[in-house]
Amino acid sequence: MANASVTCETSSGMKPRAVHTDKNGKFFITGLKQESYDLRASRNGAYSDWERNIPLRKSQTKDVTLQLLNGNTATSVVPATKKH
């Protein structure tokens, strides 16, 4: 889904961070540290369930699909770290 908002946060205290999907429903979150993350998508009042405890290792890229609860529209999510 294009222009959906995706929130990324951790249980260890990272402030929630939001990015938007591109016209193909994909996005990248860069600069994440090695940790487990929780992700949720939303658009026009429709939300996905939280995908919790997604482990991310240093320099790893991961694909996650979030399903909005109203409309059955899937959003493909790709968190990624920057190489330091």
Image (spheres, helix red, strand yellow):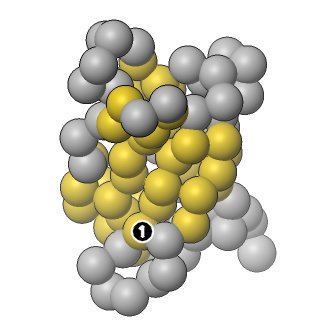
The residue that mark 1 highlights is: 9
Q: Is residue 26 left or right of residue 83?
A: left
Quadrant assignment, res 35:
bottom left
Q: Looking at the picture, does residue 4 appear above or below residue 36?
A: above
Quadrant showing the N terminus: top right
Q: Looking at the picture, does residue 30 appear above or below residue 47?
A: below
Q: Which one is nearer the viewer's eye here, 44 or 18?
A: 44
Q: Which one is nearer the viewer's eye here, 1 or 38?
A: 1
Quadrant assignment, res 66:
top left
Write the residue at 66% across / 42% down: 20
Mark 1 is on which residue type?
Glu
Q: Position of residue 71 (x, y in %)?
A: 33, 11
Q: Position of residue 84 (x, y in %)?
A: 76, 75
Write the residue at 37% across / 31% down: 46
Q: Which one is nearer the viewer's eye here, 12 or 55?
A: 12
Q: Residue furthest front?
A: 45
Q: Is residue 5 left or right of residue 84?
A: left
Q: Is residue 36 left or right of residue 61?
A: left
Visible residue check, residue 18: yes
Which element is circle 1 on? strand
Q: Residue furthest bottom?
A: 13
Write the residue at 56% across / 66% down: 17
Write the residue at 56% across / 43% down: 5
Quadrant assignment, res 38:
bottom left
Q: Counting other residues with Cα less than 10 Å from the Cα at mark 1, is it few (<14), some (14-19), or many (20 or more)?
A: some
Q: Position of residue 26 (x, y in %)?
A: 62, 28
> How many numbered discs?
1
Q: Position of residue 65 (x, y in %)?
A: 38, 28
Visible residue check, residue 59: no
